[in-house]
Image: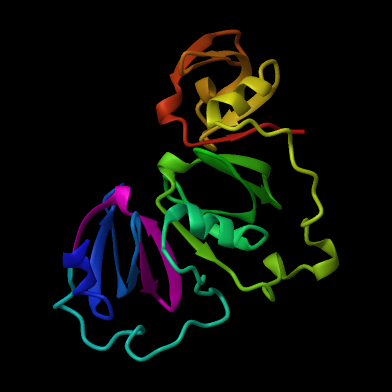
Amino acid sequence: MNDLMSLIGEKVVIEVSGKRPLSGKLIDVGLDIVVLLHHLRYLYIPFAHVHNLKADVSSGGGSESGGLPDESSIGLQVEELTTAKILQEAKGLFVEIYVSGNKSIHGYLNGVMNDYFTLYSPIYGTVYVSLNHLKWLIPYPTSHVPYARSTGNAPMGQSQPNLGKTFEDTLKKEVGKMAVIDLSGASERIGVIKRVTGGIIDVVDADGNSTLLNLMHVKTMIVPK
């Protein structure tokens, strides 16, 4: 990480998994995470998903030069920067996360477990998110009112589901229930969880067809209530 330290405060371009280039000012480098100021928003990017990072010699001043983040994002303060500590610091905050595809997920970060965490999304309800697939996290300030709703409607009081210590443990608790996996419209990823064993999820779709999914490639899961 020493080579990255030399770029702190400089404009850089980071290629994240999914071949998504992000440009901005490198703010900090932790044990397993980097912090990028991108369009005046703090992005916390797990290093496991950083494919490459280089100085941005093509841009001039840009929006990050000398600018401070606006009220859409905040910088989290921890002494030794790690992904686990950032997630703990962000608990209770409204955040934006990117996992895959062409859209982010917004919600309140609730539970943080061994290899996954939960968001309460005003749109989807509780979302289980595999930590292995988190590409970045953007925290909002506590004063932010999602979707311009009154603070009285903010779902901070939602009860937590009965969480297992691991992602697989939690999926086992949802056996027999309807689930949407990876926010996908694909029929084989929407259905009833028949069983979860040995890192394999057996999902039965509306036609009664069974599909075996590798848990390592499952990014998110929603169980409609």
Q: Is residue 102 above or below residue 34?
A: above
Query: Residue 42, image x and y in percent?
Result: 44, 71
Q: Is residue 185 above or below residue 56?
A: above
Farthest residue to the bottom: give it: 66
- 201 relative position to 144: left or right: left
Task: Give the quadrant of residue 59.
Answer: bottom left
Residue 36 is inside the magenta segment: yes
Viewer-closest of 80 and 133: 80
- 181 relative position to 93: left or right: left
- Image quarter in which the C terminus is found: top right
- 211 relative position to 120: left or right: left
Query: Residue 189, image x and y in percent?
Result: 53, 25
Residue 138 is inside the magenta segment: no
Task: Give the quadrant of residue 144.
Answer: bottom right
Could you tell me which residue is drawn at 38 percent across and 74 percent down? Answer: 37
Q: Is residue 88 above or below residue 48?
A: below
Could you tell me which residue is drawn at 33 percent across and 57 percent down? Answer: 31
Viewer-closest of 204 and 155: 155
Residues rendered magenta in the picture:
34-53
Farthest residue to the right: give it: 152
Could you tell me which residue is drawn at 36 percent across and 70 percent down? Answer: 36
- 222 relative position to 166: left or right: right
Query: Residue 30, image x and y in percent?
Result: 35, 62
Inspect this view and state whether residue 147 appears. Answer: yes
Viewer-closest of 63 and 108: 108
Inspect this view and state whether residue 95 appears. Answer: no
Q: Is residue 104 above or below residue 178?
A: below
- Image quarter in which the N terminus is found: bottom left
Q: How many marks?
A: 0
Could you tell me which residue is drawn at 24 percent across and 79 percent down? Answer: 10
